[in-house]
Amino acid sequence: MNILILEDEIPAYEKLKLYLAEYFGTDFMQDWSRSVVEAKVLLSEHQYDLILSDIQLLDGIAFDLFDHINISSPIIFCTAYDTFLLDAFKTNGIAYILKPYSKEELSEALRKYETLIALPKHSRSLNKEVFKELKELITPENKQFLKRFVVKKGNGIKLIDTETISLIDACGDFCKITDHNGNINSISQTIGTLSDQLDPKMFFRINRSQIININHIKVMDSHSKNRLLIILDGIEQGVITSSNTTPAFRKWVQF
């Protein structure tokens, strides 16, 4: 069996690969891509029996990829998007699991896949209209974005408005958020999960491990290898865009 994994978060990819090995043993091969661009190349060169895909990748959403390439493989979406997508996923060829998912939840989706491939091919074809519907559901004008963080403290629960956040730093399976006054709190969500829930007009993921708020940018300056150094409210040290994200970031700040 040949499997394609589309996942931009390295820990999530490692977890998925481990669960697949426990389910299939050695009876599978896999390719991995973190971006739409890389995935287009892989899909043009290889045939896959199954695709496991996050919705949000480094350079766009997976639905952009499926709009341009004819996909005949069953797909399991491994996503942080909430259950409002449930009805749209009720189609042959598509299953989904919500992050953070367990080994049992992935196994259940894989059993659906094994049932699906036993059907005649005409009964398990993908409905591309579903991708259009899903894409419309997560566009900024239709999506409800996170307005505040709920932080558990020793003396109770603290609410932090997203508008006050300058920087979000990835720390494995959780993130640290720093507000414009320099206060730091921890959130038990991955950076990929948070990235999906934040308003893209306000927040931008400048590299693999950091998201910034445009409203708290104080200064920007050129850095090495066409990257940008950014100074934020409440942050002592500057943050740096990656080479891959810098072109998109330059366009983003002009809107």
Image (spheres, helix red, strand yellow):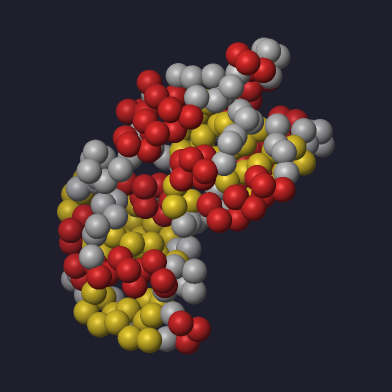
Please give left or right for residue 192 compared with residue 221 in the image.
right
Q: Residue furthest right?
A: 26
Q: Position of residue 104 (x, y in %)?
A: 58, 26
Quarter occupied by the C terminus: bottom left
Q: How many marks?
A: 0
Of 51 and 130, nearer the camera is: 130
Q: Position of residue 254 (x, y in %)?
A: 25, 70
Q: Residue at x 60, y 18 (%)?
A: 124
Res. 194 visible in picture: yes
Of 159 and 194, nearer the camera is: 194
Q: Residue at x 70, y 32 (%)?
A: 49
Res. 154 visible in picture: no
Please give left or right for residue 119 compared with residue 235 in the image.
right
Q: Position of residue 181 (x, y in %)?
A: 18, 71
Considering only vertical position in the picture, is 207 above or below 55? below
Of 138 and 80, nearer the camera is: 138
The picture quadrant where one finds residue 180 is bottom left
Of 48 and 79, nearer the camera is: 48
Q: Position of residue 231 (x, y in %)?
A: 29, 80
Q: Residue at x 26, y 46 (%)?
A: 140
Quarter occupied by the N terminus: top right
Q: Residue at x 52, y 40 (%)?
A: 66
